[in-house]
């Protein structure tokens, strides 16, 4: 701009002018720009004294607006004439040949450098725009991308800007080399990386596309690997990324220095611990006599900091110091503590909840405003908000209050996620052919925190319509209320053609009382009617006899009592944690009088990086009350999805003389699954293979549960959290079966979020 100003000075007048009093100011050359914009940029007004210094300042000010490509100032007597040439306005920005990006992404990137519809056109920005486009493609490993810019003049001093892109091929990682390693093999170290060389599944994972951010993350993973095995002085000495002349292949070379492993000789506490050294020592996870582990040190520091926070010291500092004995390969760790000052919470703010109401978030908080800062309550509050399932991210920020020494403000930052779920399921069998199930659920309807769900099943033998709603804070104390309305039409599986069905409309209400932060007890009451429809000659003898003895319609008023605890790390792809559920249903009045109980236990164990062992056990038991038999339509069923795969849905257990599968009042179900990473997917948990073994059966009221009567199956499959939702496909083969058992080998389920 300085050069333009100098040129304008020379072209505006040949000689310096003597200062004079302005009698008028004229502006010439304006087409779109308001005259007021020009007058507002001038450092002089009519009646002011004009001189060369003010003229130069006016030129600088007008050029700095970016609206003009040329500006001149001419003096005619005591009149100053400002002559401007406006820059063209960008009418349209177009992209040709862009396949890797949506145009919106590129449009936003160019807007940040000054190129956008409606903005003044400046040729100087074109080079920056081209470089920005190339930078976007470099981030996608398209190193051969070329950009050509075409400027097309339009009427009324406008231009169209067209960027023609030749994307070229994606540069892929051909090889990753690690040098300097002695204690661990190159293959073992490369398995830690998310970046990989080409593989047959990299079309999905894109792990063979180079990214500087991913490489830095992999280097941190490598550093953590060594630091957790005693190599305290490990260092990455250099990293070279080389690209082939045709810009299609990338080679990454990482040079490391391992150093020697160190064993911890002892841990000591230094600084102020308020006389609670023994309490803090119980939090130490660093083990003398074992290899130094950076994770243990970080975990101990975190535990110390949290413990200080529980006492109200929000800004406590704990610094680990290592005293290294290189000659003997030993290290002593000292933990220096500075509690700083005790503070209390002034305000708690919630940010990022664009849909969920503030009260839905705040009612989960256990830290209160105007109370002493309590780190444990804050963590519990964060975890409770996270367990709502409404947010992708939940973080708490602690900010000091200006001009105070004992106050902080807390800000809970959340990122909303879709809380609706559309589930579609299907199963294949020789009896039902194709079975479809579907449900539509909204966990946070209208941002209120309430749940609303509708489920239906189109099975030939089981047709269901269920409408459910849950208010998790029916009372201010956190007592929940659930309402269910359902209409079920079922026909137990039969080896012979039968024209009968069970029709069960009903409704129930259930309340959940939180007895602790992790335990909830449920109780409720319902009313339902079950009618056995059909001609007696076309239905199983057991149903015909029950109808003859107790009538076609049975009315029950079931009372429910249950308990749940869930500490799994994820409901979608759990890798650790436990889930337990106990439920009892009892009907003491009406035509149906019975007790039906069910217990479920799940355990997830991380075996190794990416490998998870999962167990599921479910036990069911039922008994008739008041001298009446257990209602046959309340039987448990086994076989198929959720029980023993490899057998048709509901086909296990007692069989009527007519060939109908009746189920039974006793059920045993045991499942074991072992999840492994899908080959080529790296650390991606959304795509995994699994093998399974299922064992189970149902038994009649007078039958003993014997191991020899249990059915078993084994199989394999894969689970994928696909772009359209979670998908699970399994293929099973019976391991223990009896003549007459009906087989179902292939099952899949897919869901999507909206």
Image (cartoon, rainbow, N blue to C red):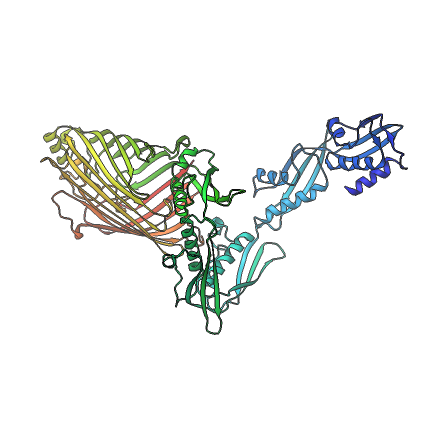
| Residue at left offset 54%, top offset 52% | 213
Asked if residue 20 is positioned above or below residue 226 in the image, the reply reads above
Q: Quadrant of the N terminus?
A: top right
Across and down, in percent, residue 89 comes to 70, 32
The image shows residue 567 at horizontal and vertical percentages of 33, 47
- Above or below, 190 against 95 in this view is below
Residue 481: tell me if it is visible.
yes
Image quadrant occupied by the C terminus: top left
Classify residue 34 as left or right of residue 329: right
Query: What residue sits 59% from the left and 41% below the top?
Result: 98
The reply to whether residue 723 is visible in this rendering is: no
> Quarter-wise, where is residue 127 in the image?
top right
Q: Is residue 650 left or right of residue 747?
A: left
Question: Residue 609: x, y in percent?
Answer: 40, 56
Q: Is residue 638 above or below residue 356?
A: below
Q: Which of 752 and 335 is in front in this view?
A: 335
Residue 33 sits in quarter: top right
How many numbered callouts?
0
Task: Name the residue furthest top.
Answer: 23
Residue 521 image offset from top left, x and y in percent: 26, 39
């Amino acid at each position: 701009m300085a050069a333009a100003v100098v040129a304008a000075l020379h072209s505006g007048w040949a000689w310096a002018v003597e200062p004079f009093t302005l009698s008028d100011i004229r502006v010439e050359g304006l087409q779109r720009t308001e005259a007021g914009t020009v007058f507002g940029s001038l450092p002089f007004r009519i009646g002011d004294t004009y001189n060369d210094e003010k003229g130069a300042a006016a030129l600088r000010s007008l050029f700095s607006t970016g609206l003009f490509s040329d500006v001149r100032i001419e003096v005619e007597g005591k009149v100053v004439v400002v002559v401007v040439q406006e820059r063209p306005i960008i009418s349209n920005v177009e992209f040709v040949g862009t396949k890797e990006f949506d145009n919106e992404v590129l449009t936003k990137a160019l807007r940040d450098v000054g190129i956008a519809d409606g903005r003044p056109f400046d040729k100087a920005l074109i080079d920056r725009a081209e470089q920005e486009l190339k930078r976007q493609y470099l981030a996608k490993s398209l190193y051969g991308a070329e950009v050509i810019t075409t400027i097309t003049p339009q009427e009324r001093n406008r231009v169209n800007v067209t960027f023609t892109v030749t994307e070229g091929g994606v540069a892929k990682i051909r090889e990753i080399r690690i040098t300097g390693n002695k204690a661990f093999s190159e293959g073992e170290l490369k398995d830690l990386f998310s970046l990989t060389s080409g593989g047959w599944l990299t079309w999905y994972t894109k792990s063979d596309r180079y990214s500087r951010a991913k490489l830095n993350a992999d280097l941190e993973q490598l550093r953590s690997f060594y630091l957790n095995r005693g190599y305290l002085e490990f260092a990455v000495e250099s990293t070279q990324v080389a690209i082939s002349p045709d810009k299609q292949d990338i080679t990454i070379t990482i040079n490391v220095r391992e150093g020697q492993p160190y064993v911890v000789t002892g841990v000591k506490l230094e600084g102020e611990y308020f006389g609670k050294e023994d309490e803090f020592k119980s939090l130490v996870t660093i083990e003398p006599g074992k290899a130094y582990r950076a994770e243990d040190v970080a975990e101990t520091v975190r535990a110390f900091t949290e413990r200080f926070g529980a006492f109200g010291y929000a800004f406590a500092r704990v610094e680990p110091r290592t005293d290294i004995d290189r000659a003997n390969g030993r290290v002593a760790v000292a933990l220096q503590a500075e509690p700083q000052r005790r503070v209390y919470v002034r305000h708690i703010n919630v940010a990022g909840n664009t849909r969920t109401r503030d009260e839905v978030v705040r009612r989960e908080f256990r830290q209160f405003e105007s109370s002493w800062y309590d780190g444990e309550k804050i963590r519990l509050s964060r975890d409770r908000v996270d367990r709502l399932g409404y947010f992708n991210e939940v973080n708490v920020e602690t900010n000091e209050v200006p001009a105070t020494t004992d106050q902080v403000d807390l800000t809970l930052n959340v990122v909303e996620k879709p809380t609706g779920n559309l589930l579609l399921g299907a199963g294949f069998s020789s009896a039902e052919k194709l079975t479809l199930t579907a449900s539509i659920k909204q966990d946070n309807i209208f941002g209120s925190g309430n749940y609303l769900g509708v489920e239906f099943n189109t099975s030939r033998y089981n047709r269901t319509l269920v409408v459910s709603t849950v208010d998790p804070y029916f009372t201010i104390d956190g007592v929940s209320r659930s309402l269910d309305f359902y209409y079920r039409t079922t026909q137990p599986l039969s080896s012979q053609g039968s024209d009968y069905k069970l029709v069960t409309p009903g409704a129930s209400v259930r309340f959940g009382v939180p007895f602790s932060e992790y335990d909830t007890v449920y109780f409720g009451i319902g009313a339902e009617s079950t009618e056995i429809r059909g001609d007696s000659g076309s239905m199983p003898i057991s149903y015909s006899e029950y109808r003859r003895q107790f009538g076609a319609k049975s009315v029950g008023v079931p009372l429910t009592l249950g308990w749940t605890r869930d500490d799994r790390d994820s409901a979608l792809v759990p890798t650790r944690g436990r889930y337990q559920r106990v439920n009892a249903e009892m009907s003491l009045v009406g035509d149906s009088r019975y007790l039906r109980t069910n217990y479920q236990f799940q355990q997830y164990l991380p075996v190794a990086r990416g490998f998870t062992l999962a167990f599921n056990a479910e036990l069911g038991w039922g008994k008739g009350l008041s001298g009446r038999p257990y209602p046959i339509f309340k039987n448990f069923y086994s076989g198929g999805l959720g029980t023993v795969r490899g057998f048709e849905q509901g086909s296990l257990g007692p069989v009527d003389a007519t060939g109908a599968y009746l189920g039974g009042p006793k059920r045993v179900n045991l499942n074991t699954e072992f999840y492994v990473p899908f080959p080529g997917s790296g650390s991606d948990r959304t795509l995994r293979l699994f093998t399974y073994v299922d064992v189970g059966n149902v038994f009649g009221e007078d039958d003993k549960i014997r191991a020899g009567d249990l059915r078993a199956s084994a199989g394999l499959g894969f689970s994928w959290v696909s772009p359209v939702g979670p998908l699970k496909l399994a293929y099973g083969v019976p391991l223990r079966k009896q003549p007459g058992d009906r087989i179902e080998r292939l099952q899949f389920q897919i869901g999507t979020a909206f």
